[in-house]
Image: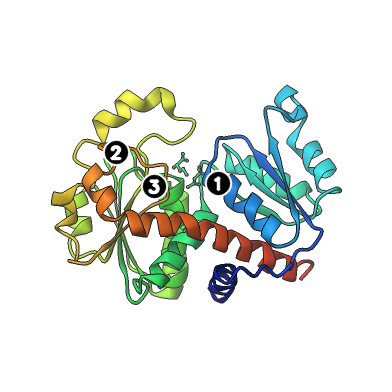
Amino acid sequence: MTWRLKLKNKRKKGKYKPYLENQTLGMIFEKSSTRTRVSFEVGIHQLGGVGLFLSSNDLQLGRGEPMKDTARVISRMVDMVMIRTFAQSTLEEFAAYSRVPVISGLSDSYHPVQLMADYLTMVEYKKDQNPIVAYVGDGNNMTHSWLMLASKLGFELRIATPKGYEVDAKILEDALAFAKESGAVITISNDPKEAIKGATVVTTDTWVSMGQESEKAARVAAFQGYMVDDAMMSLAEEDAMFLHCLPAYRDYEVSESVFEAHADEIFDEAENRLHAQKAVMVWLDRHRNS
Ligand code: CP
Ligand code: NVA
């Protein structure tokens, strides 16, 4: 946390220390991105290095070159890699063959760098003291990363998903094991109202993640009753914060009214991607080979 705030404060003063001078970050994308691409590319530039945007469609990967070969080539030329993939196993295969640190920029299973920005935003809004976080929606990569954050840091997380869209059983098992150590209280249900009651932080995510476009109609039908609207928000604590990783689909997972009422928090959260991602890169560089 210290690094994230330190880098953010330096940026406010217009100062960029070249912690990663002359380093190159390879950024491989199998999926679309606005925030992840811009935060990493601008972030490495502000740290004195350069970002290389590599779309899997343009790489030889798109013509069938194996990921493990791609990893062995790229990691001999760059200093760090950020990769956004469909399967988590693709990312892990890349990391297994890479000579340099590999950062997850999202997979179907997790979105860890987003959660670093989310937690920074909770700290800035003083919502990190004994938080009760309610996640209402799809049991997806964001939910799994909330599970990791809560279970590692030891706070209360209530997850409500429709039947059939629950979190992954193995990831939940891992989180419950971490929770035993940290004291986190994790509740899983199919009741969004019960989850939100008295929450200090409410969050959700798209009902249709990247790669699930063909399931849209079935998903929208299954998620009826899960939109975070004013009535739903009124069940949370009076000054509860609302977070969304974006992109946000109005009048699906969140109403226009809730979104705009919490726009300051949401766009601070989006800006914090930059500061958090810079901190991840500096931290990884300092812990290289350790
Ligand atoms: N929240 C997030 O990761 O956004 P992008 O998909 O635009 O990178
Ligand atoms: N769950 C969403 C997150 C987007 C940042 C997706 O994977 O598409």
**Which label belongs to residue 167?**
3
Q: Hey, what amino acid is under mark 2?
A: Arg
Q: Earlier in the sequence, mark 3 or mark 1?
A: 1
Q: Secondary structure at mark 3?
A: loop
Of residues 3 and 11, which is closer to you in this image?
11
**Quadrant location, the C terminus:** bottom right
**Identity, as a three-letter code, of the amino acid under mark 1:** Leu
Q: Secondary structure at mark 1?
A: loop
| Position above or below: 125 against 236 | below
Q: Nearer the viewer, mark 3 or mark 1?
A: 1
Residue 280, numbered label: none
Of badges 2 and 1, the one in the foreground is: 2
Give the residue number, with chain letter if any, for mark 2.
250
Q: Is residue 283 left or right of residue 273?
A: right
Q: Residues within 10 Å of mark 1 (few under 14, many from 20)?
A: many
**Circle 3: residue type:** Val
Q: Disc 2 or 1, which lies upstream in sequence?
A: 1
The local secondary structure at tag 2 comes to: loop
Residue 288 image position (x, y, % from top left): 77, 66
